[in-house]
Image (cartoon, grey):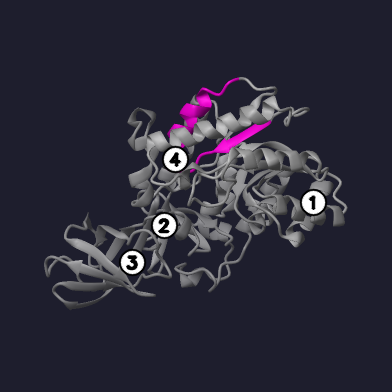
Amino acid sequence: MSGERLAQGLKELAEERVDHRFKSLPPDADGRTVGELAAERRNLFRDGFTTPVLALSAESVEHNLALMETYAERHDLAFAPHGKTSMAPQLFARQLEHGAWGITAAVPHQVRVYRSYGIDRIFLANEVVDAVALRWLAAELAADPDFRFLCYVDSLRGIELMDTALREAGATRPVDVVIELGAGDGARTGVRTETECLELADALAGVDTLRLVGVAGYEGEVPDATTERVTAWMRRLVALAERLDAAGRFADLDRIVISAGGSAWFDAVADVFAALPALSAPVLKLLRSGAYVSHDDGQYRKLTPFNRVPEEGALQPAFRLWAQVVSRPTPQQAFLNAGKRDAAYDLHLPEAQVVRSGRDGTLRPADGLTVTGLSDQHAWVATERSGDLEVGDWVALGLSHPCTSFDKWQLIALVEADGTVTDFIRTFF
């Protein structure tokens, strides 16, 4: 049934009408459905798209999906990629086709989006103490016996709030929870000590609205992270699972969950999980990396574990934001018509990569061009030579941090290397 819901949801996305809500699309496409526009296979540069326009490389997305599928299989990992990166059901479907166990969420709204598209395995990597969200969750679990949901707990008060809300909602199925081990002092959420973890396990044993199924955490929050420090924390997480299992806290489970793995240290996670000793039940070793689907030209280009294990492959950056030179006030300065409303800028400024001539469409490297700042709707570009750019040229910008690139665009062109637009990716932020 969930597969049918996902297929129906994707069909409905293709039937959505194109209009002014979606920036950069050709004005003469108004009234067409997304599917009809995609079927026309227009060229991004010649067939009516307006700048700025965000493009997602069809070839790079497919490469990245296949690479992480192979990586997870090679290391005997289940994979629940973090959906907050893209919030795009079309990409969720592709990830599931490439072997994903389920999809990870960060907040209840994201879970609602996933459920609307039939995602039946959801790991919410956060605490949930909102009574309204928990009432909705109780109803969703009661309505669908195939729906598998897990979330974090990290406090006695959180357990109390969850139990109260679920009881008041008349929950008929317990909510599966994992104890979140914090990544260290000064890190984000999560229990700081193993003693506190055991206290939470004791409390959960006396609550029938919740079921303890494992442990989890986020190694990306380890302070001053290095391979050694991340590995040490991962060993703490595994040791916690062993200790809880020895205490009988996972009795009667058919599967114990141990989950970690963002986009920067999944190699260390894989190494520690590979040495996991046998527990009282089979273990679901769940990796949650999300940024891989598009990768980037900044933060994750620098941090990807594939830099440390190049023999395993390499991700490809899939995003390019095309903007046009609209002003050239001095030989040293140019302005593009893309800014903070269009490009990620929370970690790094965009990187000028390619120039497409406004005269004849020829391409050349963006040598001598540096983005020095962003206004709301302008990119400030420093130029080394007066002939580097002229008004009307298009500039391709590489972006850093996929999570804050996807969220600025409701409909993103999926583009082949020759500029042919093959589809449009709908996001829900």
Quadrant assignment, res 306 = top left
Closer to the chain start, of discs 1 and 4, is: 4
Residue 416: in sight, yes or no? yes
Q: Nearer the viewer, residue 122 or 43?
A: 122
Quadrant assignment, res 394 = bottom left
Residue 69: in sight, yes or no? no
Closer to the chain start, of discs 4 and 3, is: 4
Q: Which residues are magenta?
A: 256-277
Q: Which residue is mark 1?
A: 163
- Three-letter code, disc 1: Asp
Q: Secondary structure at mark 1?
A: helix
Q: Which residue is mark 2?
A: 55
Q: Nearer the viewer, residue 6 or 299?
A: 299
Q: Is residue 38 above or below residue 213?
A: below
- Three-letter code, disc 3: Ala
Mark 3 touches mark 1? (CB < 8 Å): no
Q: Which residue is mark 4?
A: 64
- Is residue 207 rendered to the left or right of residue 380? right
Q: Nearer the viewer, residue 374 or 352?
A: 374
Frontmost of labels 4 and 3 is 4
Q: Is residue 45 above or below residue 334?
A: above
Q: Measured from the top left, where is residue 346 in percent x and y?
A: 40, 62
| Disc 3 to disc 1, C-alpha distance | 51 Å
Instruction: Report the quarter where the N terminus lies.
Output: top right
Frontmost of labels 4 and 2 is 4
